[in-house]
Image (cartoon, rainbow, N blue to C red):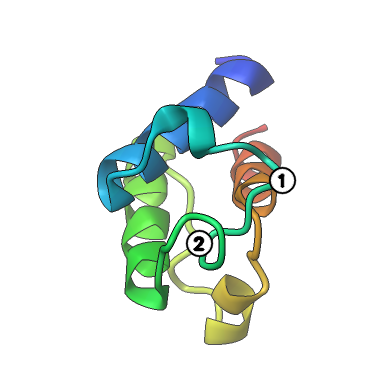
Amino acid sequence: MNENEIRQSVRAIIVERISVNPADVLPSKLFAEDLGGDSLDKVEILMDLDKKFKINTTDESVEFAENLKTIGDIEDVVVSRVK
């Protein structure tokens, strides 16, 4: 799976979990402020990503999840852990 495919998969999971328009899920968008996701949504998304990509982000601290502000931040974490 190449980087673009990983990023598309991350966006698809976000779209499914928080029921937003796929066109709105851009790297620059803020997860909470722009897309309406909350901290529980973010944790569930990270769990979904862990399962799909066989990575481990859910053992990270709460501060780790809080620091993932944009869609790009979430994508970057997954890309770095998959490669």
Local packing at callout 1 (Cα closer than 10 Å; few below 14, some 14-19, many 20+) is few
**Tag 2 secondary structure:** loop
* Residue 69 quadrant: bottom right
Mark linked to residue 5: none
Circle 1 sits on which residue? 28
Local packing at callout 2 (Cα closer than 10 Å; few below 14, some 14-19, many 20+) is some
Question: Residue flagged by tag 2: what amino acid is it?
Answer: Thr
Residue depicted at 70% across the width and 44% down the height: 76
Residue 6, how many percent across, how many down?
Answer: 55, 26
Residue depicted at 53% across the width and 84% down the height: 62
Mark sitting earlier along the chain (2/1):
1
**Tag 1 secondary structure:** loop
Q: Which quarter shows the C terminus?
A: top right
Circle 2 sits on which residue? 57
Residue 49, how many percent across, how many down?
Answer: 41, 46
Residue 9, how many percent across, how many down?
Answer: 45, 28
Residue 23, how many percent across, how many down?
Answer: 49, 28
Marks 2/1 in contact by CB < 8 Å: the verdict is no
